[in-house]
Image (cartoon, grey):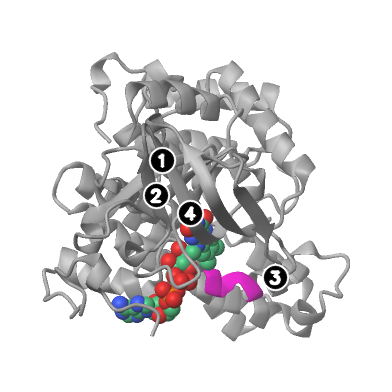
Amino acid sequence: MTEPSTAELEPVDEFRLRARRWLSDNLEPAPPNQHGETSKSEESWQRAKQLQRILYDGGFAGICFPKEYGGLGLTPEHQRVFSEESRAYEMPLALNIPTLTVCAPTILDKGTEEQKRTHLSAVLRGEELLVQFLSEPRGGSDLAGLTTRAERRGDSWVLNGAKIWSSGAYAADYGLCLARTDWSVPKHAGLTMFLVPVRAPGVTIQRITQVDGSREFCQEFFDDVVLPAEAVLGEVDGGWETTNRQLFHERSAVGGASPYSSGIQTHSGRDISGLIESARRTGQLDDPRVREDLGEARALNMVHDQLIGHITRGIAAGEFVPAAGSMVRLFSARNSWLQADMAVRIAGAAAATGCDADDAATGQAGQDYLMRQAWSLAGGSTEMALNQISERVLGMPREAAADRGLPFDQVERGR
Ligand SMILES: Cc1cc2nc3c(=O)[nH]c(=O)nc-3n(C[C@H](O)[C@H](O)[C@H](O)COP(=O)(O)OP(=O)(O)OC[C@H]3O[C@@H](n4cnc5c(N)ncnc54)[C@H](O)[C@@H]3O)c2cc1C
């Protein structure tokens, strides 16, 4: 994002004080486990939309989105202080990934004026939820090798295929769907991104039950879904460029570095109060091994927050390529793994049985442990992040690819 000139902006300290007063007058305290919730009910989506509307009406929605689309046009520093101040309050965190931090910024980067005015302001008012239709049943890492197709019919497009692992699709209004529009060119060159109404005729959504019991993931089937020409996001056959922006925003969001969130993001601004409380309850606060874990967790969180600032500033200043966001994404996944493991070590057997009824954090430790693998996959897997860093940040040789330069209809598939 291009940062606005700071001369005419509200000073960050004044903004912080104004936000602090407004938050205490207008929002409720954060409910327990606000930051660990993985499963959402219809009521919690409705509540998130309502909270987003309260932020919008109070003049605190879309801090880094431009004013002409309903945002405040302020800087990531304003966003950071608002996230800090709002941490203790009930916030519409469910809207952050992917609606506010991934899909909306992609529309901002690549959308037409009409798309930006329609979708961004609806998102910031809490009236529209977005979802990513990227991964397919055959695989997600080789994203450019996808086979969902869109064919021209007159002025319209007809979409056929299937997507999977779409977080929250059942509650969404529009999906950013990448489809193949030209099979006669190499794989990256024949893709187009579409804005697909999730409830259009021909779209079927099925929810998937995960190992922790949550049902946020969905699989979608597209059967002759008719889309108008205006549904194209970016250029026809230029979908890879749009996708690159989307993946950039996704890496930032999953790493906790996006400037577009409403409130603190999943993995940024972590604190270790839950780990300390668990150690106190189980009488282990003086145990040297536990103290070592707590110290390590605190240090990792500090490094994570510093890394976010360093990489974000470096990318904005052009000192790092956008792919450097993979470093935050990689660190964030490893930190999540380590802290999920620590929480289970401290909680002991109660993490598996969830039987310490007086301590919500104990049951949460078991849930987080089951979900920790997700953080090595979401936003592109850890292995793909390593590939990105080696090839695009360090300039090491690209990995071999049998399909490089081949027209996609000549690439062997499904063997
Ligand atoms: C919490 C969560 C939310 C998600 N939300 C969405 C969403 O909203 N929309 C969406 O479209 N998708 C979503 N995904 C899917 C996610 O993008 C994919 O899981 C991810 O891209 C990996 O794809 P895959 O699962 O198909 O694994 P595969 O691509 O099948 O890979 C399997 C394994 O092989 C490794 N591998 C593959 N290729 C290489 C290579 N070239 N070099 C080294 N290792 C390799 C991978 O790292 C991985 O470990 C989500 C996933 C998670 C966990």
Badge nearest the viewer, 3 or 2: 2
Where does residue 263 sit, x and y in percent of width and height? 55, 39
* Residue at the spot 77% in from the left edge and 85% down from the top edge: 349
Q: Residues within 10 Å of mark 2 (few under 14, many from 20)?
A: many
* Contact, mark 1 vs mark 2 (Cβ under 8 Å): yes
Q: Which residue is mark 3?
A: 367
Q: State how far apart marks 1 and 2 are (Cα).
A: 6 Å
Tell me if I can see residue 264 in this picture. Answer: no
- First in residue order: circle 4 vs circle 2: 2
* Residue at the spot 52% in from the left edge and 74% down from the top edge: 337
Q: On the image, which quarter does residue 75 sit in?
A: top left
- First in residue order: circle 1 vs circle 2: 2
SS assignment at label 4: strand
Question: What segment carries the magenta color?
Answer: 370-374
> Is residue 5 shown left or right of residue 332?
left
Q: Which residue is mark 1?
A: 157
SS assignment at label 2: strand
Of 344 and 40, which appears nearest the observer? 40
Q: Is residue 398 inside the magenta stretch?
A: no
Q: Amino acid at mark 4?
A: Asn
Q: State how far apart marks 4 and 2 are (Cα).
A: 6 Å
Of 141 and 340, which appears nearest the observer? 141
